[in-house]
Image: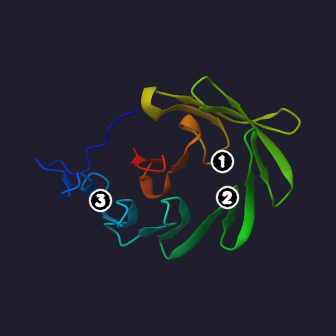
Amino acid sequence: FEFKDGAKLATEYMYDANGSLIKDLNKGIEIQYNLLNLPSQVKFSDGSTITYTYGADGVKLRTVHKIGGVTTTTDYCDNVIYENGTAKQLLTEEGYVSLSDKKYHYYLKDHQGNNRVVTDQAGGMEEANYYYPFGGVFLSNGNDVQAYKYNGKELDTKKGLNWYDYGAREYD
């Protein structure tokens, strides 16, 4: 787990009057916020964007990734996740059901709620994650089969963003 200094400048981070990060030169991103002070759009230096839509209560409803000419829309409807209009996952306390093949996947969690291991319905390991303190991935074995990792929070790794969605804040 290592910091990648992508800018090598004296000032690489900029904040607004609310204290929210609006520019990260290391990741090459600019961030816009909505009236709830939640990120509404992340713009990358190459023109790629991630757009977020929230309900009035601040719960994330949709994420749209436009990366390299490809648009992926993810809708969050309670415990069902849709990707490009197709139901993809049904989330449960114990794990999730992949709706394309109707198979169960179970989380083995530690005392902090970190998803350490994901198993298939027969108990075979699909993914194992080992974390540094505060969420950096130390080691990951198997396939990257699902996005819910440290503290059970969704990790967005697209374009090197590496943000955990904690609801009120994105954490990197």
Q: Which mark is residue 155?
A: none
Measure the alpha-carbon separation of dots 3 and 1: 26 Å
Q: Residue at x 43, y 52 (%)?
A: 160
Look at the image and tell me whether residue 12 can be seen. Answer: yes
Kind of residue at disc 2: Asp
Badge 2 local density, few (<14 within 10 Å), some, or many (20+)?
Answer: few
| Residue on which the image places disc 2 | 78
Q: Is residue 152 above or below residue 27?
A: above
Among numbered discs 3 and 2, the one appearing first in the sequence: 3
| Residue on which the image places disc 1 | 146
Instruction: Identify the residue at the far front of this view.
Output: 57
Dot 2 lies on which element? loop
Residue 48: image x %, image y %? 41, 70
| Residue on which the image places disc 3 | 28
Among numbered discs 1 and 2, the one appearing first in the sequence: 2
Q: Is residue 17 above or below residue 63?
A: above
Instruction: Identify the residue at the far bottom of this view.
Output: 69
Among numbered discs 3 and 1, the one appearing first in the sequence: 3
